[in-house]
């Protein structure tokens, strides 16, 4: 049973309400002491990841008891769950390297997927006091210092596109062939799902990602960007879909208003 489109506006507010306490738990670890461990794939995980996920998952079950959740740390510990056509994707702390480096560019992410499409997403950057949210048919917004403003992608700037690249993952050399022939104004490096949010708020235009990502890494940012007028495509031009075997993504390109190949 799907959440109908007319309920997504209210649902977006409820998910934002769920994410904020998780962000506070992450921030408490960030500003204090925490333990850092390595998972089987050698990626880092901290107490903050586990504390945030422990707050988010029960809250989502209370909100929607019949909708399963695919969450990064639960998958790491217990394996990948079976899901249907509607499910949550949860990344309790995206940008763990940024968290460890204490540069503030880490996020808490929750997305709702229906029939392979992220129809709702919330991205909270607790250290920056920024909450990005968006839903299909609702639009996108950012809230900071108690003020909320609408988000929209920008048209292609006359002086060229601003490309967003990962701060912690070395995609830049492989991106050169993809970017060849495009009029570029510069590159901005930023961590976590904030890359999608830069596109959504019209601060950048293009985010190509050729390296490995998981669905929970990008679904919430994808939903915010789509609600702001952008899109995410696989390298063959097909829309990015969710619920794939293994929840692993192929290479992709996120577009703001410069949504041309």
Image (cartoon, grey):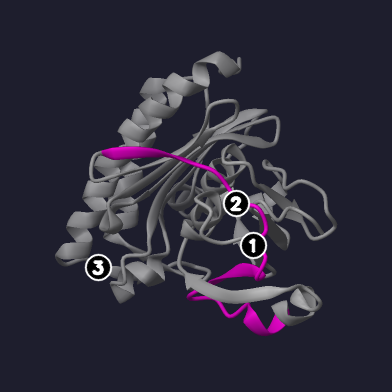
Q: Nearer the viewer, mark 3 or mark 1?
A: 1
Position of 19 with respect to 10 (left or right) is: left
Q: Secondary structure at mark 1?
A: loop
In the current view of this chain or complex, which residue is farthest to the left? 32
Residue at position x 79%, y 55% from top? 260
Which numbered dot is residue 157?
A: 1
Separation of disc 1 and disc 2 at Cα?
8 Å
Q: Position of residue 142 (x, y in %)?
A: 40, 43
Image location of residue 57, percent across then percent down? 38, 36
Q: Nearer the viewer, residue 126 or 88?
A: 126
Magenta residue check for 148: yes
Q: Residue at x 46, y 69 (%)?
A: 190
Q: Position of residue 20 (x, y in %)?
A: 28, 40
Stretch of the chain drawn in magenta: 147-174
Q: Is residue 82 visible?
A: yes
Residue 77 appears at what percent x and percent y? 45, 53
Q: Are marks 2 and 3 in contact (CB under 8 Å)?
A: no
Work out how far the residue at label 2 is from the one at label 3, CA to CA, in angstroms.
Answer: 41 Å
Q: To which quarter of the image does residue 145 belong?
A: top left
The image quarter in which residue 14 lies: top left
Residue wearing tag 3: 35
Q: Nearer the viewer, residue 20 or 131?
A: 131
- Which residue lies under the disc numbered 2? 154
Secondary element type, mark 3: loop
């Amino acid at each position: 049973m799907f959440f109908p489109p007319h309920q997504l506006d209210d649902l977006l507010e409820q998910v934002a309400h769920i994410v904020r306490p998780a962000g506070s738990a992450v921030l408490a670890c960030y500003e204090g002491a925490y333990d850092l461990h390595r998972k089987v794939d050698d990626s880092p995980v901290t107490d903050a990841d586990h504390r945030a996920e422990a707050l988010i998952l029960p809250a989502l079950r209370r909100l929607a008891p019949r909708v399963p959740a695919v969450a990064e740390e639960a998958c790491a510990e217990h394996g990948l769950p079976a899901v249907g056509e509607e499910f949550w994707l949860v990344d309790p702390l995206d940008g763990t390297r940024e968290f460890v480096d204490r540069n503030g560019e880490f996020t808490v992410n929750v997305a709702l997927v229906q029939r392979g499409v992220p129809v709702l997403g919330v991205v909270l950057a607790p250290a920056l006091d920024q909450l990005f949210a968006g839903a299909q048919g609702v639009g996108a917004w950012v809230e900071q210092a108690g003020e909320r403003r609408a988000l929209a992608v920008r048209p292609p700037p006359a002086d060229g596109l601003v490309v967003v690249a990962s701060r912690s993952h070395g995609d830049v050399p492989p991106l050169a062939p993809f970017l060849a022939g495009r009029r570029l104004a510069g590159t901005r490096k930023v961590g976590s799902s904030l890359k999608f949010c830069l596109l959504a708020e019209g601060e950048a235009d293009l985010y190509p990602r050729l390296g490995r990502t998981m669905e929970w890494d990008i679904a919430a940012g994808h939903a915010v960007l789509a609600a702001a007028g952008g899109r995410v495509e696989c390298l063959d031009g097909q829309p990015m879909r969710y619920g794939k075997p293994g929840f692993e993504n192929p290479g992709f390109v996120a577009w703001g208003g410069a949504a041309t190949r």
